[in-house]
Amino acid sequence: MIRKFLLAATLLATAPCAFAQTIAITGGRVVTNTTQGVIENGTVVINNGRIVSVGMDAAPAGAAVVDARGKWITPGLFAAMSRIGLAELDSEDSTNNTSASRSKFQASLRAADSFDPDNTAIAVSRIEGVTRVALVDGAGEGLLGGYGALADTTGSFNSIFARDVVMYAELGESGASSVGGSRSAAWTWLTTAIDDAKAYPRGFTDDGEGDLLSSREALAFKPVVEGHVPLMIEVHAASDILQVLTLRQREPRMKLILLGATEGWRVANQIAAAGAPVIINPLTNLPDRFEELGATLENAGRLSRAGVKVAIADPNEATHNTRLIQQLAGNAVANGMPWADAFAAITSVPAAIYGRTDLGSLKSGAIADVVIWDGDPLDLMSSPDAVYIAGVSTPMVSRQTKLRDRYMNLDETRPQAYERE
């Protein structure tokens, strides 16, 4: 505990000059997520928010040296699917912006417009090693949830660093219930929306209406249909996954991401052949609906061995427990997924899904999101000692740690109402 405190204090002291001074993190076990693999007793050099070098060289002259002997040095964690910052309290409508089920707008909505950088869950995730998140809203009145965005976890007002990076849609049981009660109705809804977007502005009435979408919605959906933005479709049953994959033939320009894919292992070869990445929760094991009857803890490992690009996240815990992706990845390893694949599933794979080759790995030129861990980051007992985002050391505190520290040693001689922060 004392070592953690001293290391954090050292890093905070360097924060004001983080961009002016070169920082060298030395002596740790470096997980690069590149062809360099894992480097024992490695050195990561940072300057001006970027990684300068990764290897076994000595720290450059004049660099601020951070001693990480006995520790792990890794890229920051990247949550492939999150709703952090979109809801302070899930049960309180006034603070919950995760979906707009009563709105006529769908494709034209943007998660970035609802993001609150002061959300208390952000700091909680940051001190657990999460440095980047993909914000994805739930579906609106139909099947679409609008555009997702990428954000860092600094808690600053400029946390959003990429807008309109993905669009969410739901099929399967939830999609069927939303648009008429059957999978056929949901599929027809989706393909009609695609056709409207492809046709726009042809075929629209003077009032701006297509067969299904308004002109505003069709215009918003058009970049997705044209393949400029990927469509993340939540499906779970093997049969639903295969149906989604037929879009590869119908709409070859569209880029697909499968969310959920609980029975993905049953059709892993088809997913791999289609080149569609998946975002899964590897702990889904006890089915709570018919479309998940084939759930297994080995889903992640089987998909990975089949050559599927696997990212790990839990949509059901997306607002407050994004930080649990570390534990999910560890459980995937316990059930057959190689360690390197599981760690990539919460770092480099999510970055790649959203086209960010400058995140999720430790290599020259990459954005310097770096975490120093006191042990194996996929071990439940390990935790970060320090977190850098874009080369700047971040405070290892949250509202919860402040409350812990405030009330750990109470001065019982003074009424607490008069205590200051």
Image: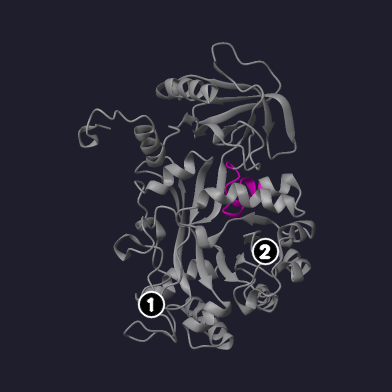
* Residue 276: mark: 2
Residue at (39, 74) in percent of width and height: 101
Residue 215 is labelled as: 1
Residue at image coords 57%, 36%: 383
Pick the residue in front: 263 or 56: 263
> Circle 2: is it few (<14), some (14-19), or many (20+) Cα within 10 Å?
some
Magenta residues span 344-359
The single residue placed furthest to the front in the displayed view is: 413
Q: Residue 311's spot in the image, x, y percent?
A: 64, 55
Task: Return the disc, 1 or 2, that comes first in the chain's sequence.
Answer: 1
Q: Are marks 1 and 2 in contact (CB under 8 Å)?
A: no
Calculate the distance from the C-alpha at mark 1 to the C-alpha at mark 2.
29 Å
Q: Nearer the viewer, residue 388 or 20?
A: 388
Disc 1 residue type (three-letter): Ser
Instruction: Count neighbours of disc 1 (C-alpha within 10 A) and say few if under 14, some if 14 to 19, many if 20 or more.
Output: many
Q: Is residue 206 above or below residue 386?
A: below
The verdict on residue 294 being magenta is no
Q: Quadrant of residue 76?
A: top right
In front: 129, or 397?
A: 397
Place residue 111 in its image quadrant.
bottom left
Outermost residue on the left side: it is 418
**Going by the image, does 112 lie left or right of 245?**
left
